[in-house]
Amino acid sequence: MSKEKLVIIFTVLIDVIGVGIIIPVMPAYVESFKVSPFVVTLLFSVFSLFSFLSSPFLGALSDKYGRRPVLMASILSTSIGWFVFAGAPSLFFIFLGRIIDGLAAGNFSTAQSAIGDLSHNPKERTANLGIIGAVFGIGFLVGPLLGGLLSKVSHVFPFWFVGGLSLLNFILAYFFLPETNKNLDRERKIHWNPVKPIFIALRDLKLRQLYVIWFMFNAIAIGANSIFAIYLMEEFGFGAYETGLFFTGVGLIIAFNQGFALKHFWLKKFTEKQLILLMFSVFAVGFLAMAYPGLWLFIPGVVCMAFAQSILRVAITSEIMGEADEKERGQATGALTAVMSVASVIAPICAGAVLGVRHWLPFFLASISSIVAVLVIVRRRFPKIPTPSPLQ
């Protein structure tokens, strides 16, 4: 593998590890500033909001001025964001660190574009993007475990560690990453409108209900993930290390399901439509079990949640891509990303607000929302047939 690809892959890996590290460690660190759990979930939303705003802009910049300068700037910004977050003397700097990191988070899509530039044919491009996907999975396995282990030093040490890794990544990119975009469009006008894909999704009558289902899935999963560590800490007294192990277990289930079981079992036994309906039902059961304040029922609920989440993400995406017109699949991909981004902003705020009422309530509402999603799916599959009037 070329050094250019290795640098790009390392960039993605650091990004994902950083996200994984923050999940089990952030609640304990942020709550040391004497704030409520709602503020912790608000930090997830702030990061997602600025990532949503920056991604299309950074992508357009990379088409006009090149992948290298955009990647270099975003990697350095990620490092600065982590250092600001880790060294924060007050809550203001905690939020500032997440905003800086969110603004740089568009480097994932730029890294994908750079990998595409380095591909010589469609087959190689697919293989390279598959490597990026595998690295994404590895990062989410390693991140929570690493966050839990490093938290043994202190709750702030994992963030200094990731900031240092990002700085190392910047240095490697400076020396080894060439410009991959050989077709720069210097005359291109940059039109920045991050909400345009949302309007596209709403206007698409054929796929609108599938986009609604996609939004519900992401809102349920992201909302639950944003309060998961807080729930473990406040309900069961778990620290960052134990929480990291929990998330690593979830990551292993997801990796097994997506990497092996999906191809060799689920897709052989069920169609995509059946899987979506079935797994939302599993979602409903799993979150209902998680709402019960006892580990003996909570753990099986987490297993159900992880299984359903890993399959639903792939099945819904594939269903939308399959039903979209061939000439509009790129547009559908943009709409998928935009809808997920909106869910990433809204869901943590809602979950954090509900958590303040009752610890178990976010999971209970996630179960109810899953049942609503099942009803939407059933209505889509079996639309009401109009009854002819007697005069007809």
Image: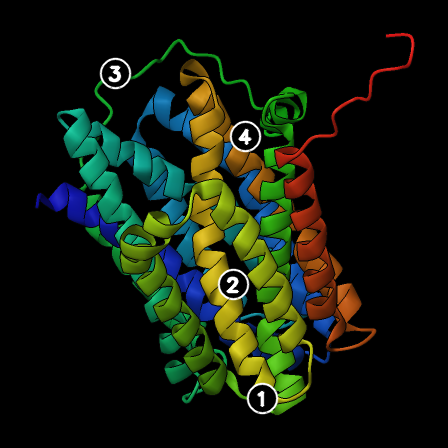
Marker disc for residue 183? 3
Identify the residue shown where x is 67% and y is 87%.
235
Look at discs 1 and 2 and give the one toward the viewer: 1
Look at discs 3 and 2 and give the one toward the viewer: 3
Look at discs 2 and 4 and give the one toward the viewer: 4
Return the residue at label 1. Answer: 295
Which circle's residue, 3 or 1, is located before the other in the chain?
A: 3
Which circle's residue, 2 or 4, is located before the other in the chain?
A: 2
Question: The residue under label 4 is which amino acid type?
Answer: Ala
Which circle's residue, 1 or 2, is located before the other in the chain?
A: 2
Structural distance between the alpha carbons of marks 4 and 1: 38 Å
Which circle's residue, 4 or 3, is located before the other in the chain?
A: 3
Identify the residue shown where x is 15% and y is 33%.
124
Q: Residue furthest bottom?
A: 237
Of residues 372 and 240, which is closer to you in this image?
372
Residue 225 in the image: state x and y as whole percent: 57, 65
Mark 3 burial class by Cα count in 10 Å: few <14, some 14-19, many 20+ = few
Return the residue at label 4. Answer: 335
Question: The residue under label 2 is which amino acid type?
Answer: Val
Task: Left or right? Give the position of 259 relative to 328.
Answer: left
Question: The residue under label 1 is which amino acid type?
Answer: Leu
Q: Is residue 375 visible?
A: yes
Residue 218 in the image: state x and y as whole percent: 58, 50
Q: Tag 1's secondary structure?
A: helix
Q: Is residue 94 visible?
A: no
Structural distance between the alpha carbons of marks 4 and 3: 25 Å
Return the residue at label 2. Answer: 84
